[in-house]
Image (cartoon, rainbow, N blue to C red):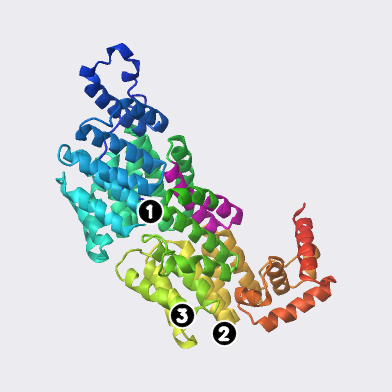
Amino acid sequence: MTAVHGLGRRARSPQDTGTEPADTPPAARTAADAGPLTVRLIDAADRARLAGLPDRARELLARAGHETAADAVRGAAQLVIGQLALQDGPAADAREVLLLAAELLGPVDGRRALVAGLAAMEAAWATGDAAACREALDHAREQPEPDQRLAAFRAGMSSVMDGRLDRGRHQLREAATAAGTPDGPEALLRAGGAALVAGDLVAACRANSRALAVARARGPRVLVAQALERLAYGELRAGRHARARAHAEDGLRTALGTGQRNLAAHHHAILALVASVEGSRAAVAEHASAAESVAAPHGLAQAATLSQWARARADLAHGRLPEAAARLGPLVGAGPRRGHFAVRMLAVPCFVEAAARTGQEDAARAAVTEFARWAAQGADPQAPAQLARCRALLTGPEACEPLFATALAHHDQHTGDFERGRTQLLYGTWLRRQRRPGEARGRLRDALVSFERGGAHGWAAQTRAELRATGDAGQERPYGELALLTPQQLRIARCVAEGATNREVALRLSVSPRTVDHHLRNVFAALGVRSRVELSRWLDRAEKTTADP
């Protein structure tokens, strides 16, 4: 989610891009009317930007000759330049331009100065710079407050940036009441953004859905892609992944069509996260790479953090625990490589799962300690269940089962099949390792239903493999040439074919390295292969043959 400023003037229509000044004969441009012409060109550039025509906007600005104009005129030009850079350019540069615009406009145009200050906060938010967010909010605070809801939004964001999440959430909930009024799309987007930060996903989706409808009906066009991004992110947070994908795909097309590459990077990151649930590693890689190709040069820390989280969750879905822990460790920890402040806590449960199962208990416990403080402030409805699940992974056998039960009780209070399925899968895996296969099968079957209902195909495949390991006769056995192997041998062979060591296979499948070694020797003997390379080639050929009709 990107922060929302939302006080910009609306374009009169998508076609009204200020072409009248372009038709003015050069001879008519006297010194006497150069000032008014400059103003008209800047206004036309802003309308072109709002209509999704950034190249036209830049062309008009280049002709405006605003560099030597009065502060009010230069400030208006810098505001448009900064907003264009925020749509497609380095976010840190956009922030500096917008702060300059706020300084120039402050004494003469308080409304536009407020727009510039809030847009500067949006740019700082994209970079993940909390201190810069506070600075931009201080600029915005110098201007008069048009209404109580905007005052609540500014106060709430300031509290969040200062680490006072409880206070900030209450203020942002007040700001989110704008969702129930017939405001324009800017105010509705601001309300939706406030609700997302406050953790009220129902209000967030409602406000952003309304903003989308209003922007489509009345414009401006650039806000359609923004509304789709807020809505997709809210649906993602709420666990409605198919809806999130539909909105993000629509938003990606719209963002690219209106010259908003920075926003397109966010849509790609959301699609990567959806793909990490649905099980397509190729789609995760494609969308994450697309997001990162813009996020890196433009300094979009939020999009970069989301894309790395998506890659790590795909690793988890396919049992690549060390890789997932390596990706997420820097994001959730301290130091210069830490992830975006609004995203990093959301990724902690994935890190804890990977770290706890790869022998990195100390790092996992440190992450859980911080996550517990965050969860206690009500920042996300799924956090209490996730916290109990994380603690279950880090405790002894006696305390583990009650913590899993607590997690499931929390899941019962909220929607979200995917997170519930993950808890059931981990619980079932733990029961199997405790040599309680009958109970494990019950939990794993519940997990399978949750994953299949939510379209989490990769996670469903992992659950079926766990069910086979419990001896569940209802699970499909290998066929064709693959029938030469038992289900457990096939699982081990597939892991080895992906390049995993025996120890890594043991971690993925929750068995001992000795068990892996035993099964692997039997696999080599059954297939007549003599190396891991030969095994990989045999498995690739056998699975292609089996897949053919």
Give 375 or 304, whichever is nearer the viewer. Answer: 304
Residue 500, quarter of the rendered image: bottom right
> Decide: marks 1, 2 in contact (CB < 8 A)?
no
Name the N-terminal-most of marks 1 and 2. 1
The residue most toward the right is 528
| Residue 280 included in the magenta stretch of the image | yes
- Is residue 545 something one can see in this rendering? yes
Give 211 or 84, whichever is nearer the viewer. Answer: 84
The residue most toward the bottom is 398
Instruction: Classify residue 107 as left or right of residue 453.
Output: left
Q: Is residue 361 above or below residue 462?
A: below
Residue 379 screen position, x and y as percent: 32, 64
Residue 111 screen position, x and y as percent: 19, 39
Residue 135, quarter of the rendered image: bottom left
The disc labelled 3 sits on which kind of residue?
Answer: Asp
| Tag 2 secondary structure | loop
The disc labelled 2 sits on which kind of residue?
Answer: Gln
Question: Magenta segment range?
Answer: 261-288
| Tag 3 secondary structure | helix
Name the N-terminal-most of marks 3 and 2. 3
Name the N-terminal-most of marks 1 and 3. 1
Q: Name the residue beneath numbered marker 1.
A: 127
Q: Residues within 10 Å of mark 3 (few under 14, many from 20)?
A: few
Which label sits in the foreground, 1 or 3?
1
Which label sits in the foreground, 3 or 2?
3
Instruction: Classify residue 4 as left or right of residue 286.
Output: left
Give 121 or 157, whichever is nearer the viewer. Answer: 121
Q: Residues within 10 Å of mark 2 (few under 14, many from 20)?
A: few
The image's mark for residue 434 is 2
Residue 81 screen position, x and y as percent: 33, 37
The image's mark for residue 362 is 3
